[in-house]
Amino acid sequence: MNRDEIISILSEDNPVKTEELFRRARAVRAQEFSNKIFLYGFVYFSTWCRNNCNFCYYRTSNTIPRYRKDASEIIAIAELLAESGVNLIDLTMGEDMAYHKESFASVFDLIQEIKDRTGLPVMISPGVVEHSWIDRFSDLGTEWYALYQETHNKELFARLRTGQDYDERMNAKLYARDRGMLIEEGILTGVGESVADIADSLLEMGRIAARQVRVMSFVPQKGIPMEQVKKPEPSQELKIIALLRLLYPKALIPASLDIDGIKGLEGRINAGANVVTSIIPPRSGLAGVAQNSMDVDEGGRTVAEAAQILRNIGLEPASAKEYITYLTMLREASS
Ligand code: SF4
């Protein structure tokens, strides 16, 4: 599919054609993954951040309650998630200077401990960090480095991620890939991008060989400069998910519970996603990223809830073994 075709599909608002797009995306997923869907546990362990992204609730200028979980709490949550049946532990943080000051030593210990105790693959989402720290992630066998540009239009990037360097961010990701880590790239939709910008992003994700590719709808939140920006039409995110599936049949494509909670899962899966992300144990005192409280404490973002929804539409949660086998295949294809 070329840029013009992607733009044309994104500009189309005929519901019959959109439904046909989703049907094609599901068919491609079934061909590659049969009826299996992967499940990721989410541990957002520090909401402190030095940056001031205009779309983010946790931007440094927002005066909100914040937390930094200690190692024993993080490990306990990871173990709970593993017991509940997730396939991966996603360790996410803001660019928290407390960890930068200690050269990430406690994060490295955490990764090692979680891998030892759960036996599960780990994704680290630390923001932009020094290359020598990425070397250490790789040496520890950390499977994934997640770092999202959110847009690949450099002017829009400068407006969204104020004061940050586009190339530095991209280079950190490419360095992780070249050190043998799998990389996740992502965009936000509804942040002032054009359909041409989205098409460029989707193609760029392929060029950089991102093996997990995600789109999330922007959610306006209190206290941020973009508080008054309207949430985009839900169909936009779904169409982008379907396009990603058609462009990259073997990719891991998240259906995040962070935007609409558990009720938004079925639509995203029906658009071609194959990973349920942002699963959180209830009452763990954790926040979401795109929305700080969506279904988090109510227990609506668990493996049991997600598995039920998947089974209702003829799909099955994958086992940890199936996920590890899949990652092995991805890494062999990447090397
Ligand atoms: S998006 Fe990430 S880097 Fe930007 S302010 Fe939020 S937590 Fe920090």
Image (cartoon, rainbow, N blue to C red):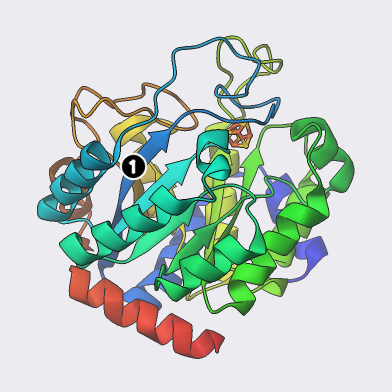
Placement of 277 over or under 222, stated as above or below: below
Q: Nearer the viewer, residue 191 or 92?
A: 92
For the point 82% across and 62% down, which residue is it? 4
**Location of the N terminus (image quadrant):** bottom right
Left or right of 94? Residue 92 is left
**Foreground of the two, 26 or 41:** 41
Q: Residue at x 39, y 49 (%)?
A: 106
Q: Are there few (<14), some (14-19), or many (20+) residues within 10 Å of tag 1? A: many
Local SS, label 1: strand
Q: Is residue 108 left or right of residue 187?
A: left
Task: Please tell me in which quarter of the rendered image ligand 1 is found.
Answer: top right
Q: Position of residue 184 (x, y in %)?
A: 54, 61
Percent across and percent down for residue 266 are: 32, 45
Question: For residue 60, which quarter of the picture?
Answer: top right
Q: Residue at x 41, y 59 (%)?
A: 123
> Residue 307: in sight, yes or no?
no
